[in-house]
Image (spheres, grey):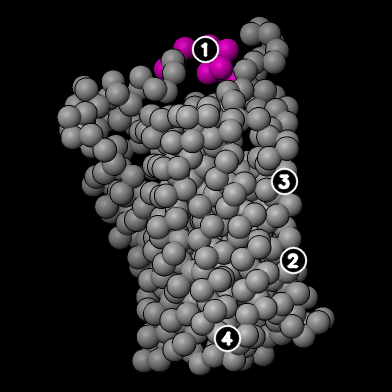
Amino acid sequence: MNAKVGNKRWEIIFLIVLCYVVLYMDRSCMSIAGPVMMKHFNWTATEFGLVSTAFFIGYGCTQILGGWLADRFGGGKIVIIGALWWSVFVFLTPFGSTLGLMLAIRIAMGLGEGVCLPANSSIVAQWIPKKESGFAQGLCLMGVPIGIVLTMPLSVWIMQNWNWQSIFYTFAFIAPIWVLLWQKFGKDKPEQHPAISKVELEYIRADQGPQGICSQAACVTARDIFSTRSVWSCAVSYFCANYLLYLFMTWLPTYFALGRHLTMDRTGMYSMFPYLVATFTYPLGGYLADCAAKKFGDNIGRKLYPVIGMIAAGILLIVGSQAASVGTAVALISASNGFLCLTMGGFYSMPIVFSHRNAGKITGVFATFATIGGVTAPTITGCIIDYFGSYEYALFVGAGVALVGAMILLISCNVRPIEEKISQGSMLHI
């Protein structure tokens, strides 16, 4: 941050951090209420896994669409529509009296949240120079663990004083408050901000390549993006990281409550620790990715810490799942989640390197693969628990998937700007 240049871009980043806080408060309250809801509705572990998975079915359907719309019409507009949509279905969640109705409500909620991540990345691509992109994305994603950490004790307190339904009734009104903040202070592009200085605008645009010029690296097509192997290999690797991330997000409180036989109070407290660690490792990972890219270049620098983070996360989870004491298990699982979240700033700075003008679309591809992890992890975990009667095997699978992701990223992905692969005259621009 440079006061001489100006800091309006970081004010926008702060608003996006708040957006992620709200996004994950509304998303993760289901996992906190999960053990109580399982008893209320008489769900098996597999059925709870299906309910958790349903959200990601809707979530995955709007990822690429959200990125395309954000690049075309502005990310803020898309996030506002998504936030108001998902809030309606947060409120309606307690009315899911049958398994089918609950699945429909969660799918509809996912449709709204799905547009937000690629739309926010599109905003970041407009406001942040490439050399600060990793740190900026890490800061934005810091809102994820903050939202989860806030949700855990708040949800437990609401359940203890009222009931589990009140969690959803209360949380439904948080996103509309954020919408009012964005309408007051947010802008999709720096040129639209009335108070930005000319110096800061030039600083931002100088490190983003040509604006409005169809250069070989700047004006790529859908065919160019979707025929680039590295986009797909990075997306597959990101799926692997998110398989473990969503395993933690959907099953960790239930693991502590039922797998480690803890009380609700202790479950809420211990479930916070992995995300307290992640609050620091999200921005740290982005900062380290920027530093590594400056020293080693984008290809090595943007991949270095994602590879290290996934390997460390997998190993620590395997060791933590075998720990005899609860305290040791919590410490090792917290460290595992911390290393996992260290990867995210690097991952989300890659689309800006591939194509600044199409960062929202490429982020949509990444996020779609991440959502496949969100769909598969809760369901597979539930099936493993029901079949084996143990949580450890499910944790082993999550650790193994993360280790495979590290190998894919290391071997198959080349992080560099995408260039046109066909002649200018035959291109269909996106």
User: Which three-letter amino acid code belongs to the residue tagged 1?
Assistant: Cys
Do the residues bearing badges 2 and 1 touch, measured as CB atoms within 8 Å?
Answer: no
Please name the residue that numbered disc 2 is placed on. 397
> Which of the image's four quarters has the C terminus?
top right
Mark 2, other Cα within 10 Å: few <14 / some 14–19 / many ≥20: many
Whether 348 is drawn above or below 84: the answer is above
Please name the residue that numbered disc 3 is placed on. 407
In the picture, the disc for residue 131 is none
The residues colored magenta run 211-220
Q: Nearer the viewer, residue 56 or 363?
A: 363
In the picture, the disc for residue 325 is 4
Q: Position of residue 11 (x, y in %)?
A: 26, 44
Q: Position of residue 160 (x, y in %)?
A: 40, 91
Circle 1 — which element?
loop
Q: Earlier in the sequence, mark 2 or mark 4?
A: 4
238 to the left or right of 156: right
Q: CA distance from mark 2 to mark 4?
A: 22 Å
Dot in front, 2 or 4? 4
Q: Nearer the viewer, residue 64 or 196?
A: 196
Q: CA distance from mark 1 to mark 3?
A: 35 Å
Do the residues bearing badges 1 and 4 touch, measured as CB atoms within 8 Å?
Answer: no
Mark 3, other Cα within 10 Å: few <14 / some 14–19 / many ≥20: some
Residue 395 can be seen in this image: yes
Circle 2 — which element?
helix
User: Which three-letter amino acid code belongs to the residue tagged 4?
Assistant: Ser
Q: Earlier in the sequence, mark 2 or mark 1?
A: 1
Do the residues bearing badges 3 and 4 touch, measured as CB atoms within 8 Å?
Answer: no
Please name the residue that numbered disc 1 is placed on. 214
Mark 1, other Cα within 10 Å: few <14 / some 14–19 / many ≥20: few
User: Which three-letter amino acid code belongs to the residue tagged 2?
Assistant: Val
